[in-house]
Amino acid sequence: MVAEAWSEQHQLAIEHARAYLRRFGEDGEIYTWLGVGWWSQGKTTEARLCFERALELFGDDLSDVYVVVFTANLYQQLGARGPMHALGERWIAILESKLSAFPDNFRIRAWLAGLYASLGRRADVEKTVDQYLAQVAAVGQSRDGAMFSLPYFLMRVGSIDRAEAVCGVVMRKDLAVPPVLEKVWIDGISGAQREVLLANPALQAYRNATRRRVAELAARY
C-alpha cells in the first residue's frame, strides 16, 4: 500500500489501506498514506481526518515526521492558519529538542526546515538548509531522502536564489524521488505563488531530472 502511494497509484492505495484498517485495526502509518491518497484526489476533508488521526496515534514519539509536514501543508492549503501554527510550533519544539540530543540526524534537520517553511520563518529555513548541506559535505553523505525536499521548502518562503542553488546541489545526487512527495510539497504552496515557482527554470530542470530518474528505475525493475 505504501509503495502504491509512493508510485501515485492512489486509488489502489486507498482501497488497500481501507481494507487493512478494517482487518487489522488502526495504524498511524496506514492513515498517513491513506490521507495522501485522498489528498491527491482532491478530497481534503478525508485527508485531514486521516492525517489528524495518524498524529493522534503516533503521539510525540513519531520517528518519521512525514505526516506532520503533510498536515501542515494541508492546513495551509485549506487556510486553517490556527491549526497550522499550533501544529508547527509544537513539533518545532519537539524536533529542536531531538536535534539538540542528536545533532548528526539529517532527517530531523530537514523536517525542521519544512516546519519553519510552514510558518514562514525564512531566516530559520535558510539557516537550517545551510547547516544540512554543510553536514552532508562534511561526512560525505551521498544521499538522504529528505534532501530532495529542500528546494521546495526554500521556495515556499520566497528564498528563490537559495532554492535554485540547492536544486543544483541536489541534482548531483541520485534523484530517485517518489513523485507523490513532489506533489505534496507543491500543493503546500499557495496558488499564485505556486504558478510563479513552477515557471522557475531551475525548478523545472530539477523536476524533469527527478522524473527521468524515476522513469529509468521503473523501466529497469
Image (cartoon, rainbow, N blue to C red):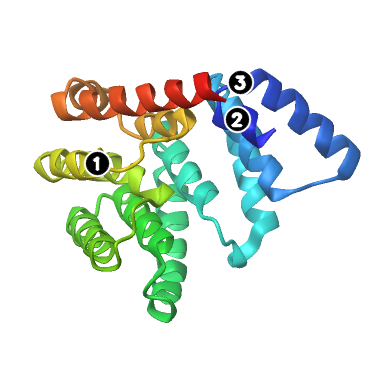
Identify the element where label 1 is drawn: loop
Q: What amino acid is labelled 2 in the image?
A: Ala
In the image, what residue type sits under mark 1? Arg
Identify the disc placed on residue 172: 1
Q: Amino acid at mark 3?
A: Gln
Lower sequence index among marks 2 and 1: 2
- Residue at 61% over, 26% down: 38
> In screen coordinates, is 98 left or right of 20?
left
Q: Residues within 10 Å of mark 2 (few under 14, many from 20)?
A: many
In this orientation, which residue lies closer to the viewer: 80 or 118?
A: 118
Q: Is 118 drawn above or below residue 133 in the view shown?
A: above
Residue at 35% over, 29% down: 210
Q: Position of residue 214 (x, y in %)?
A: 44, 26
Tell me whether the residue at label 3 lies in contact with that at label 2, contact meaning CB atoms closer than 8 angstroms. yes
User: In what quadrant of the picture does the N terminus appear?
Assistant: top right
Residue under circle 3?
9
Q: Position of residue 101 (x, y in %)?
A: 43, 81
Residue 5 is tagged as: 2
SS of the residue under disc 2? helix
Q: Nearer the viewer, residue 53 or 95?
A: 95
First of labels 1, 3 by sequence position: 3
Q: Secondary structure at mark 3?
A: loop
